């Protein structure tokens, strides 16, 4: 692995609890990892520890076979060859854009440096801005210059902390995809923090969810959505509700019985904690996403529409069963039902995810 964090913890002297608590993760060369999580969950502190700006009190950080932090080892930030684009990573106001981007290019001839600056500006879509000064550029353009500056010295690793949060939505989406492409082309390994889950899913090879200093899960976006490891991740990612389920054993097959019928073909992977027949009858919660519930007038299971929000192609319906249990369902928007109407629904669950009670 290109980047390996093993049980990394960061504790600020004034804080009671660690900001980063025993985090382990790995990134392969050329991968883009993305960290998401609530405010204060430790994302920035983790990035700063990798950059060497904050001391990791315990654990190890290894980059490209080099131990950066570990017992008796602490490589200085400036020797880590890690590029950074932080939210508040200001440009030098008295230097023009070319000088800003060329700032970290030591040991290069003038011609070579200018060529590299031109390449970087083309990369971020700001050709011809060499002689401008930061104050002549918009916030978004300045942030793209910061990205160009971080990439210019060809860092081993790029860290990005909410790099697009100051940009308008359209530019941000474009830039996020552009950055993804640029990093892939350049085979640069990067770790990014964002508060935008869609952005994380769109660009991340691997996405991590942090909460209270801990990395709850580190997985491909698809797995994070379909196989959340914890209730917190299930709740944080996408629309999900919990429905009570009971394990039923019939004809040697396991099914899960719920208020909306039986879930067939429950794989062992979905219920790793259940191994023996004696577990039949056991109760747990089943995660239901809004796309696990399908509108079907012929279904014997009925739910009342409590709220609906128009999403263009779909409505997101908040439904209530007679028991009072609320559910969320994405329904194609040509099915336009009224609030308080009862509609037929059925389960269409591809991945059964359960959590112990
Ligand atoms: N310099 C500091 N001194 C003391 N405590 C700090 C310091 N910096 C951060 N913290 C605390 O460490 C915890 C993690 O903060 P951090 O900024 O890493 O979270 P975050 O997930 O990046 O949050 P956000 O999404 O709001 O940027 C918080 O409880 C925060 O208050």
Image: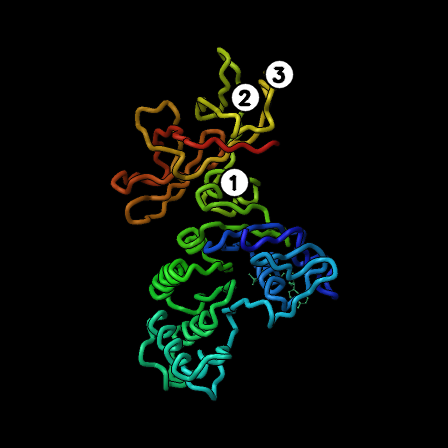
Mark 1 C-beta to ligand 1 under 8 Å: no
Specify the farthest residue to the top.
251
Helix, strand or loop status at disc 2: strand
Relative to 292, 82 lies left or right = right
Answer with mark 2 or mark 1, whichever residue precedes in sequence: 1
Identify the mark at residue 228; answer none if there is no mark.
Answer: 1
Helix, strand or loop status at disc 3: helix
Q: Which residue is mark 2?
A: 247
Q: Residue at x 42, y 76 (%)?
A: 142
Quarter holding ligand 1: bottom right
Residue 28 vs residue 89, the one in the foreground: 28
Q: Position of residue 169 (x, y in %)?
A: 37, 63
Answer with mark 3 or mark 2, whichever residue precedes in sequence: 2
Mark 3 and mark 2: Cα distance apart in space:
10 Å
Identify the mark at residue 278; answer none if there is no mark.
Answer: 3
Q: Position of residue 246 (x, y in %)?
A: 54, 23
Closer to the eye: label 2 or 1: 1
Q: Position of residue 113 (x, y in %)?
A: 42, 80
Q: Residue at x 54, y 47 (%)?
A: 218
Question: What is the crowding at mark 2: few (fewer than 14 residues within 10 Å), some, or many (at least 20)?
Answer: many
Q: Position of residue 342 (x, y in %)?
A: 36, 32
Answer with mark 1 or mark 3, whichever residue precedes in sequence: 1
């Amino acid at each position: 692995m290109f980047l390996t964090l093993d049980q990394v913890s960061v504790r600020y002297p004034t804080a009671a609890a660690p900001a980063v608590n025993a985090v382990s993760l790995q990134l392969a060369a050329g991968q883009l990892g993305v960290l998401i999580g609530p405010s204060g969950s430790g994302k920035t502190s983790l990035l700063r520890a990798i950059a060497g700006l904050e001391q990791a009190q315990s654990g190890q950080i290894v980059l490209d076979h080099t131990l950066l932090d570990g017992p008796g080892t602490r490589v200085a930030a400036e020797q880590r060859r890690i590029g950074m684009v932080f939210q508040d990573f200001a440009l030098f106001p008295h230097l023009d854009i070319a000088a800003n981007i060329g700032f970290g290019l030591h040991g290069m001839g003038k011609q070579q440096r200018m060529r590299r600056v031109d390449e970087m500006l083309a990369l971020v879509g700001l050709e011809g801005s060499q002689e401008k000064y930061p104050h002549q550029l918009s916030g978004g353009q300045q942030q793209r210059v910061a990205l160009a500056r971080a990439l210019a010295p060809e860092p081993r690793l790029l860290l990005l902390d909410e790099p697009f949060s100051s940009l308008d939505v359209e530019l941000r989406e474009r830039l996020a995809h552009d950055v993804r492409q640029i990093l892939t082309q350049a085979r640069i390994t990067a770790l990014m923090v964002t508060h935008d889950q869609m952005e994380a899913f769109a660009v991340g090879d691997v996405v991590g969810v942090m909460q209270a200093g801990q990395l709850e899960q580190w997985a491909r976006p698809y797995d994070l959505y379909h196989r959340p490891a914890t209730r917190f991740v299930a709740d944080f990612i996408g629309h999900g509700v919990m429905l009570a389920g009971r394990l039923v054993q019939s004809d040697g097959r396991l099914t899960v019985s719920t208020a909306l019928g039986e879930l067939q073909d429950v794989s062992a992977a979905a219920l790793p904690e259940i191994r023996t027949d004696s577990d039949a009858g056991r109760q747990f919660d089943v995660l239901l996403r809004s796309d696990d519930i399908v509108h079907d007038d012929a279904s014997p299971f009925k739910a009342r529409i409590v709220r609906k929000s128009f999403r263009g192609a779909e409505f997101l319906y908040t439904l209530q069963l007679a028991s009072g249990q609320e559910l969320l369902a994405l329904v194609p928007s040509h099915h336009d039902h009224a609030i308080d109407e009862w509609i037929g629904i059925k389960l269409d669950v591809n991945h059964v995810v359960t959590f112990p009670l």
